[in-house]
Amino acid sequence: MAQEFYKKIYSVKEFYTALYKALRTLKYLRKNKKSNMLDAHFIERIMLAVTEVNGCEVCTYAHTKIALEQGMDNQEIQGLLTGTTDGIPDDELKAIYFAQHYADTRGNPSIDSWNELLKTYGTERSLGILAAIRMIMAGNIYGTALSAFKSRLKGKPIKKTSISYEVKMIVSLIIFLPTSIVHGIISTLSKRPVIEYQ
C-alpha cells in the first residue's frame, strides 16, 4: 500500500492554533529529550505516524530521511507511512495510537484518550509525547501548503488547494510565529491548561 498525500487540508485559523499549541508545549519535548524519557526513535515514530494521517509530502521526505539516518528499519518506516504499526515496540504503541487519534481529530483528542496516555506514561512523559505530536502537526499543516505550492510551480496543482490558500498559509508564518509565542507566554502565566477538550 502506498502513502496518500494531501489527506487533510487545514484552515489558516487551524494553523495558528496548531502553532500556538506546539510552541506552548515545546519545553516538554526538550525536557523529555534531555532526560532521555523519549528517545530519538520514539519521537520519529510519532512524527511519521502523524505525518501519515495528515499526508504531508514534504514532512514525509524530511522525517523518512531523519529516521533512516538514525538507523530505523526501512520496513518499519514504510509501515508507519502507510498506517500500520507492525514492528513498533509494545511500550510505544499507545503513544502511536494517541498520535494518530490526535491528528485524525485535527488536534482535538478525547479526554479518555488523554487520560489513557497519562495512565500509561505518567504526566511528564505524556507531555513530551503531546509536544512531539503538536510540533509535527504544525509542521504538517504548514508543510502541506508548502508542498502544494511547490507542486503548483512545477505545473501540477493540487485539486484540494488554491494558489491563494497556499500563499496565505506560507506568508501567515511571519505574523503567526511571534503572535503565538506571546500567546503561549500569556497562557502559561495565566495558568491555562496545556490541553483542553472540545
Image (cartoon, rainbow, N blue to C red):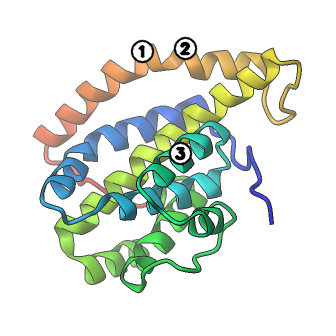
Q: Position of residue 195 (x, y in %)?
A: 32, 57
Identify whether 34 is placed above or below 147.
below
Q: Which mark is residue 65?
A: 3
Nearer to us of marks 1 and 3 is: 3
Whether residue 27 is visible to the viewer of this picture, yes or no, is yes
Pointers 2 and 3 in contact (C-beta within 8 Å): no
82 horizontally vs 86: left or right: right
Q: CA distance from mark 2 to mark 3?
A: 26 Å
Q: CA distance from mark 1 to mark 3?
A: 30 Å
* Type of the residue with mark 2: Val
* Type of the residue with mark 3: Lys
* First-in-chain label (2 vs 3): 3
Q: Who's the residue at 68% across and 49% down the image?
A: 55
Query: Quadrant location of residue 129?
Result: bottom left
Q: Who's the residue at 54% across and 56% down the image?
A: 48
Q: Which mark is residue 175?
A: 1
Q: Secondary structure at mark 3?
A: helix
Q: Position of residue 112 (x, y in %)?
A: 41, 78
Q: Which residue is mark 2?
A: 171
Q: Who's the residue at 62% across and 17% down the image?
A: 168
Nearer to us of marks 2 and 3 is: 3
Identify whether 9 is placed above or below 70.
above
123 horizontally vs 91: left or right: left
145 horizontally vs 90: left or right: right
Q: Who's the residue at 33% across and 28% down the image?
A: 180
